[in-house]
Image (cartoon, coloured by chain):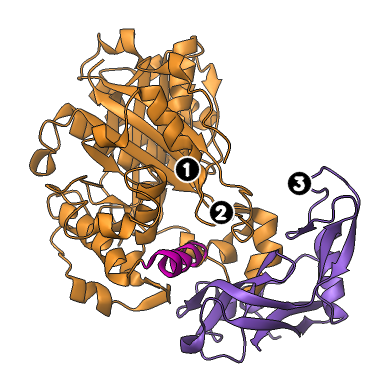
Amino acid sequence: MAPTPAPASTLKDAACVVGIGETAVCRKPGSGLSEMALQLRAVAAALEDAGLEARDIDGILPFPNLGRAEAFAASLGCENLRFAATLNLGGAAPVAALRMAAMAVASGCATHVLVPAGWNGFSGARTREISATDSEAIPGAVVARDYYLPFGLSAPPHWYALMARRHMHEYGTREEQLGAVAIAMRKHAQLNPGALMCGKPMTMADYLASPMICAPYRLLDCCLETDGAAAYIVTSRERARDLRQQPVSIMGAASGQPYPADDIVNRKDFHRTGLTSAAPEAFAMAGLTPADVDFAQIYDCFTFEVIQQLEEAGFCRRGEGGAFVEHGGIELGGRLPVNTHGGLLSQAHLLGVGHVTEAVRQLRGAAGARQVADAEVGVVTGWGDFGDGSIAILRRGA
Amino acid sequence: MEHTDARLVRPLPLMDGLAKQFYDWCARGELRFQRCTRCGAFRHIPRELCAKCGSFDSEWARSSGRGTVFTFTIVARALHPAFLNATPYAAVIVELEEGVRILSNVVDCAPGELEIGMPVQVGFERQADSVTLPVFRRC
C-alpha cells in the first residue's frame, strides 16, 4: 500500500463543532414532513443549541441528493452564503464534511458551516429498493446497472454480505460475532429514550432466530430504515470560545476511497476501504493512536461493517475484529464503547450525522445514562458507496 | 389492455459501449475480457484504458471460463421486485483463471452446497433477444 500521506496538520484543532440538532425519529406513520422540512427542523435545533442565528450561516454542505445548499439558504434566510459543496461519499459524507468544514473555516472561506442530513427513510423511498426505484442513485451507477443488477445483486445488504462472507472464510469470523454487534447497539439503545429500539431488548437467541435476508446477513444485521434528520455546525476555534456550548475540537480528520471505488468485485485487497488509508492519516493529524480513544461512533449500516471498520481504523488488526466485539468489548464499560446512542442498527438511520451529534454529546458530558465516564477523545466514522470511508477524531474543549 | 410493471422485468445491462461489447461476446457463447495489448493485463469491469500501463489499446481475449468461488451471498429475500420468484439465489463473485473477478450467479447448485473455493465453469443464459448473461455451474 502507498505510504500514509502527510496529514493536514495545519487543520488540527483549527475548527470546532459548536451546535447539534436532531428531530424525533420514527417509522410508522412517517414524519408527515417533506425531507427539506424535516432537515430544517434539525437545523433550527442546531442553531438554537449553538446560540447562532440562521443569517450567521455562510457555508452549507448538504448530503447527496437530499436538497441543495441554495434551497437551505433560501429557506433559512442565509443571505451571505459563500461556501457550498456536496461530498459524493454516500453515508461517509457527513463525517467527511467535518474536514471540509474545518478547511473552510480555517482558510477563511466561511465562518459558520452547516452540515444537515435527513430523510423519510421509512415512509419515503426505501434504500433497500434503491435499484428498483432510482438506479441512478446506486453507488458505482453504471457498473452496478450493467454488471451487478442483472444477477440480482441489487441492494446494500447484498453488496456488503459479499465482504462479510469472505471475511468469515479468511479469518474465521462467526455469525455470533456479527450478532454481538447487533446486541451491543441494542443494549445502548435501551439507554437512549430517543432510540427507536428503546424498550425492545434483544438476545443472541433473538438474533439467531431473525430471518435471513442475504446470508450471512439476517434481518437483525441490517440497520433501521427511519424518518428523521440531524445537523451540526462548525466554526473556528476562536469563534467557538465565544459561543454558548462547550466546543468540541476536530483534532484529526480524513476521508478516502477503496480502489476501484465503483466496483466491489475487483479489489485486489478485498477488505481495503476508504477508511484503511483515512484512519492513519487522521490519527497522524491528531497526534494520537487508537489506544487514546475513549469511545467510537462507527457507521453501522450492517453488523459486519462495524467489525471491518474497527479493523481498518486500527482499533485491532485485520481478522481480529470478531473477537474485539465479543464479550461486551464494544459495549459501555467495555474496552471501546461503540455507538452509545444505538447507531443505525437500533437508534435510527440519520445518514451518519447522528454519529457526529452523539460524539459531540459524549464530549460535552451530556449523554445522560449512556455517558462514557470522563470522555475526552472520541472517534466517528462514516461509510458509504461501496466502501468510501471517513473518520474524525474529536476532543472535548477548544 | 395488459399492464406489465416494468419493475417486475429482470433488469438488464444497457447495451451500449463497452458493456455491449462484453455481452455481445456472451451472446456468441464466449466469455471474453479486455486484455491490454501493451502490457498483457486482463481487466474487468471493461474500461477505456489500462489502469496498469495507461494504454488505450486492448483486445477481447477469450477466457477459459474456469474459476473458483471467491465469495457469495444467498439472497433469501428479494429486494428488487424482479427477483421475487427467484429466491433463494446465489450472487457470487467468481475469480477466473485469468485473474479477473466477475459478479454472477451459480446455478444448478443447492444454496447450502455453495462454498468458497468451489471450482466453477461458465455457461450462458439468454435473457432477452439481445442479452445473454454469463452464469456459472459447479464443475
Mark 2 surroundings: few (<14), some (14-19) or many (≥20) residues within 10 A: few
Quote the CA–CA distance across marks 3 and 2: 16 Å
Q: Is residue A229 above or below residue A74?
A: below
Mark 3 surroundings: few (<14), some (14-19) or many (≥20) residues within 10 A: few
Q: Quadrant of the C terminus of chain A?
A: top left
Q: Amino acid at mark 1?
A: Thr
Question: In the displayed structure, does residue A329 sit left or right of residue A320?
Answer: left
What color was chain A assigned in the picture? Answer: orange
Numbered marks: total: 3
Give the residue number, with chain letter if any, for mark 2: A269
**Quadrant in the picture for residue B121:** bottom right
User: Residue at coordinates 49% horizontally, 88% vertically from top-left?
Assistant: B113
The magenta stretch spans which residues?
A: A159-172
Asked if disc 2 and disc 1 are in contact, CB closer than 8 Å, the reply is yes
Q: Nearer the viewer, residue A129 or A188?
A: A188
Q: Nearer the viewer, residue A267 or A47?
A: A267
Give the residue number, with chain letter if any, for mark 3: B51
Chain in purple on the image: B
